[in-house]
Amino acid sequence: MANLLRKPFGAHGEVHRITSTDAGWRYVGFSLHRLRAGERMAETTGDREVILVMVEGKASIQAAGRDWGTLGERMDVFEKTPPHCLYLPNGQDWTAEAVTDCAIAICSAPGRGGHQARRIGPDGITLTQRGEGTNTRWINNIAMEAEDYCDSLLVTEVFTPAGNWSSYPSHRHDEDDFPRITYLEETYYHRLNPAQGWAVQRVYTDDGELDEVMAVRDHDVVLVPRGHHPCAAPYGFELYYLNVMAGPRRAWRFVSAPEMSHT
């Protein structure tokens, strides 16, 4: 298995590109572009469906034969306002021109052409609490199972307060045995507030064959090919992550780690 912790290439332009081949898996793709005002980029979705997430800043987007206008509102992801996103099926060209400095996440998975291009958010996305106590975090669901926008993709944002745990209790979704559990590969795109901060993510299997504990920093990506994958934000550092999941079935079913039985 390839290295699970991916550092950004730099601070400008395409700073991440994770493909299925590169990751050693079958479904999830993730890339991130950090553009300066006035810069343009263009891509095609090919045989994949895509959700463009305006993580920060604003961009004018043309895609699937339409002008979608300017997408984006929050200038700092930690404003926690709902994101502006765009869903594109396979076989579509798209271009983006940065209206302000911006960060655009490109979430992808195999597409079947079952859905039309559409805007997602900010309407319909509400920041909701999950967990309690030091397990409290806040969720912006972009395209989870309840939202039938996609063929394969499951995408969500999570804000974890300083000092709290997230993706916790520890759980895994690495078997295709629905409805007990589903096989879903996953990427975590991390942001820290303040930016010089750090957080921790562990990826581990029950048998210990895979067991990595990683210090994640601003703009890092963690791959979760299998196993449990909790995160922790130290006191003083707020954590954001953008999750992308996909597998053979568009359903999120997981099994908790054995040591979590008492929680």
Image: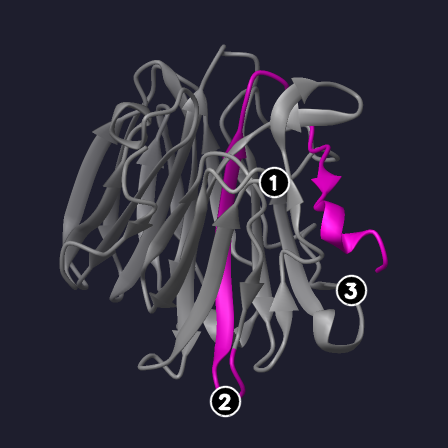
Task: Mark 1: give few (<14), some (14-19) or many (20+) Cα within 10 Å.
Answer: few
**Residue 126, percent across and down?**
71, 59
Residue at 70%, 50% in the rendered image = 124
Q: Which of 146 and 38 is in front in this view?
A: 146
Task: Mark 3: give few (<14), some (14-19) or many (20+) Cα within 10 Å.
Answer: some
Residue at 55%, 50% in the rendered image = 229
Residue 109 seen from this side: yes
- Using the numbered discs, state the Cα–Cα distance from disc 1 to disc 3 in whole angstroms: 23 Å
Q: Is residue 252 above or below residue 166?
A: above
Question: Which label number is shown at residue 206?
Answer: 1
Q: In this view, does 175 lie above or below 143?
A: above
Nearer to us of marks 1 and 3 is 1
**Residue 31, percent across and down?**
29, 42
Residue at 52%, 42% in the rendered image = 208
Q: Does the magenta stretch include residue 247?
A: yes
- Using the numbered discs, state the Cα–Cα distance from disc 3 to disc 2 in whole angstroms: 20 Å
| Residue bounds of the magenta highlight | 234-263
Query: Which numbered disc, 3 or 2, marks the residue that appears first in the sequence?
Result: 3
**Image quadrant containing the C terminus:** bottom right
Q: How is the image coloured?
A: one colour
Q: Which amino acid does label 1 sit on?
A: Asp
Which secondary structure lies at badge 2?
loop
Residue bearing mark 3: 131
Q: In this view, does 21 lie above or below 232?
A: above
Q: Quadrant location of residue 219?
A: bottom left
Query: Which numbered disc, 1 or 3, marks the residue that appears first in the sequence?
Result: 3
**Residue 261, percent across and down?**
83, 51
Which secondary structure lies at badge 1?
loop
Residue bearing mark 2: 236
Q: Nearer the viewer, residue 249 or 112?
A: 249
